[in-house]
Image: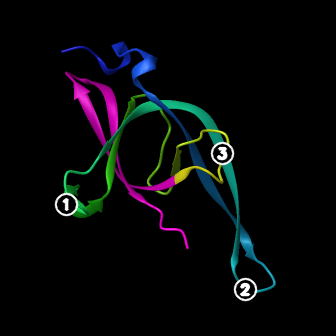
Amino acid sequence: MPYYSDIPNRFKQQFSRIRRTSGGSQDAYGDATFTEQTTTGFRGNFQGAPNPMQTVTIGGKEIAYDARVFTGATMLVAENDILLFGSSTATTVSTRYHIKGIVLEYDGTSVDHKVLYVTQEVSA
């Protein structure tokens, strides 16, 4: 079985990651302030869930997800990050996915790739 990094980039979709940082203060309406930092250029494979709101158990917690994203082992990602698919540069035409769970896939003793379980953000 080939390593994930051996799959050519032409078979991987490009996407961006948004990381939110809390500002620790409130605006005039009493809402918490935060900043978003977008990092572009990530690549991976997107696979929709076989059933609507499919569930998986990760670390003893049941998580409902809409899709899985397979990405390299070195991608820095956290469960509160957002992924943008569709356009890696224009956030207004991208579909936003919230990361609900992360599973590290090993090849022996080293991490080969990561599987991100995501849910699509519903926009009004």
Q: Going by the image, does 62 lie left or right of 117?
A: left
* Discs 1/3, front: 3
Q: Where residue 115 appears, x then y in whole percent?
A: 32, 40
Number of numbered markers? 3
Q: Quadrant of the C terminus?
A: bottom right
Name the element at disc 3. strand
Q: Is residue 47 above or below residue 31?
A: above
How are the colours assigned in the image?
Answer: rainbow
Q: What residue appears at the point 66 percent right and 45 percent down from the top-left corner? A: 38
What residue type is disc 3 on?
Thr
Q: Where residue 82 appears, x then y in whole percent?
A: 52, 53
Residue bearing mark 1? 60
Q: CA distance from mark 1 to mark 3?
A: 31 Å
Residue bearing mark 3? 38
Farthest residue in the right direction?
Answer: 28
Main SS of the magenta part reads strand
Name the element at disc 1. loop
Q: Quadrant of residue 41?
A: top right
Name the element at disc 2. loop
Q: Going by the image, does 56 lie left or right of 82?
A: left
What residue type is disc 2 on?
Gly
Q: What residue appears at the point 76 percent right and 86 percent down from the top-left corner? A: 29
Residue bearing mark 2? 30
